[in-house]
Image: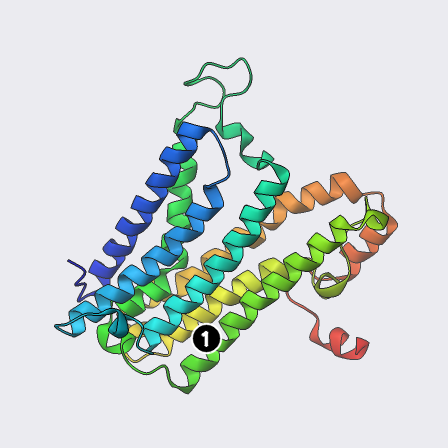
Amino acid sequence: MLVPATVGSALRLSAGVIAAVNAAGFAVTAATKSHKVTDLTGTAAFVASAWATHAASLASSTPTSSLALLLRPSRGFALACVVSAWGARLSAHLFTRVLRLGKDERLDFLFPGQGDPPLGGPSLFPLKLAGFWAAQGAWAWVCLLPVTVLHGNPAAATGRLGGAGAACVAAALAFVATEAVADSQKNRHYEDASKKGKPCTEGLYSVVRYPNYAAEIGVWTSLALAAATAPGVLASAPLAVAASPLFTYSLLAYGSGIPPLEEAHERKYGTDDEFRRWKREVPRLFPDVFKVLKKE
């Protein structure tokens, strides 16, 4: 039953939902040897978990449940909506990209190459693939910790959003929009034949070098603050609430986000004067506010 009266049971429910969605994605990917459902399934796990824990929070606080109750404005509902907006935006962007490119070359190492045996071989198929999907599930579970912890506190989750919570939700949605703008600007740059072989340094990319990643950190920081401002939530699991933005920042700044892109940029644009100036003068993630204001 969807009745988590505690943070612990909400965390277990989130883990179960995320594991089930990613297991389905793994099965389809292993059977088809295609990357095309990877991002769709990965982001779907976020959305499914957010709504499952939201529904469970309602079920533990009221004897009746209905779609109207599930959609009733509350703090928990607002956070589930933000996760849905984030997931819809990201999955649409990534799915469109993989359809255009045909595959995600970064994930080729997970599948047998030409002439390799169908099982095992250099790719250790499907063991490495299973590990990838497990890591993708762990990413979702950790990022969602503030939302899950909030839903594990039914009184806070079903309560009104409040002024501070509304400001945090508005900030999260603004960061989702910023990600969309950043991705759109980069897409337009690469589609412009006159800019072929040149790095994207205009628009948001003239303020920071990785505005999409900066906005991603902003989304999960805003959600963590939205949860933390609810009565009793921060006291119930302070480390869990803080883990999401810290994990997101660490992953993007020092893990699978910026470092491999920096290496790729150096190989592709390292001798380009505009790239050298851009890398020297434009900060990686957080804008120099005084420089931006002075430019205006």
Query: Which residue is drawn at the image coordinates 85% and 43% (left, top)?
Result: 271
Query: Which residue is drawn at the image coordinates 20% and 59% (left, top)?
Result: 9
Q: Which residue is mark 1?
A: 169
Residue 188 lies in quadrant: bottom right
Q: Is residue 131 above or below residue 195?
A: above
Using a 10 Å C-alpha cutoff, classify the residue at mark 1 as few (fewer than 14 neighbours), some (14 to 19) or many (20 or more): many
Q: Quadrant of the C terminus?
A: bottom right
Q: Is residue 163 above or below residue 111?
A: below
Which residue is at the front of the view, 33 or 221?
Answer: 33
Asked if residue 261 lies left or right of residue 23, the reply is: right
Q: Where's residue 180, x and y in %?
A: 60, 62
Question: How is the structure coloured here?
Answer: rainbow
Q: Is residue 255 visible?
A: no
Q: Where's residue 86, x and y in %?
A: 48, 62
Which residue is at the front of the view, 268 or 54?
Answer: 54
Q: Where's residue 234, x and y in %?
A: 32, 73
Q: Where's residue 212, x and y in %?
A: 61, 59
View extreme (left): residue: 63
Q: How many numbered discs, if any?
A: 1
Q: Quadrant of the N terminus?
A: bottom left
Which residue is at the front of the view, 36 or 201?
Answer: 36
Asked if residue 189 lies left or right of residue 51, the reply is: right
Helix, strand or loop at mark 1: helix
Q: Is residue 73 visible?
A: yes
Query: Which residue is drawn at the image coordinates 40% and 39% (left, top)?
Result: 133
Disc 1 marks a residue whose amino acid type is Val
Residue 104 lies in quadrant: top right
Query: Which residue is drawn at the image coordinates 46% and 58% (left, top)?
Result: 87
